[in-house]
């Protein structure tokens, strides 16, 4: 059952990303690892080909928020997908 649910969710996720990519909007898709309630560190990686360091890789919500806020004035990731 988990496989079926995951397959359905993945298909829906891919469909939503396709709609965003095909739009005329300015967008950056951000795919974070597991979210934690940790402190803001400012120490994180971003890129198109980032792979998790370990099976339980996570990033604090504060660091994801930091990255997202930076994208308001940094256009280097515009119309790209970030990990």
Image (tube, rainbow, N blue to C red):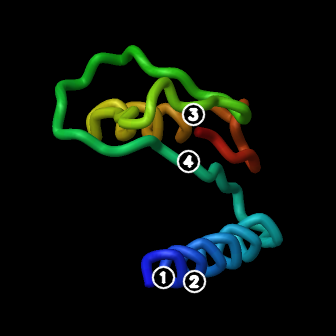
Say which element carries label 1: helix
Instruction: Identify the residue at horizontal 74%, vertical 45% (top origin).
Output: 80
- Mark 1 neighbour class, 10 Å CA radius: few under 14, some 14 to 19, many 20 or more: few
Q: Earlier in the sequence, mark 1 or mark 4?
A: 1
Instruction: Identify the residue at horizontal 24%, vertical 24% (top origin).
Output: 40
Determine contact: label 3, label 2, CB under 8 Å: no
Number of numbered labels in the structure image: 4
Q: Is residue 21 left or right of residue 71?
A: right
Instruction: Identify the residue at horizontal 60%, vertical 72% (top origin).
Output: 10
Q: Earlier in the sequence, mark 3 or mark 2?
A: 2
Say which element carries label 2: helix
Q: Quadrant of the C terminus?
A: top right
- Residue named by callout 2: 8
Work out whether 15 lies above or below 72. Answer: below
Q: Quadrant of the N terminus?
A: bottom left
Q: Residue 48 falls in which quadrant of the image?
A: top right
Q: Earlier in the sequence, mark 1 or mark 3?
A: 1
- Mark 3 neighbour class, 10 Å CA radius: few under 14, some 14 to 19, many 20 or more: few
- Mark 2 neighbour class, 10 Å CA radius: few under 14, some 14 to 19, many 20 or more: few
Q: Earlier in the sequence, mark 3 or mark 4?
A: 4
Q: Position of residue 41 (x, y in %)?
A: 29, 17
Q: Residue 39 falls in which quadrant of the image?
A: top left
- Residue named by callout 1: 5
Q: CA distance from mark 1 to mark 4?
A: 22 Å
- Residue named by callout 3: 73
Work out whether 41 lies above or below 63. Answer: above
- Residue named by callout 4: 30
């Amino acid at each position: 059952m988990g496989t079926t649910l995951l397959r359905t969710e993945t298909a829906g996720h891919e469909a939503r990303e396709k709609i965003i990519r095909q739009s005329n909007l300015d967008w950056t898709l951000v795919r974070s690892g597991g979210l934690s309630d940790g402190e803001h560190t400012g120490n994180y990686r971003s890129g198109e080909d980032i792979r998790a360091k370990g099976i339980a890789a996570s990033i604090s919500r504060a660091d994801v928020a930091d990255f997202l806020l930076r994208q308001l004035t940094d256009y280097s990731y515009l119309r790209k997908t970030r990990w």
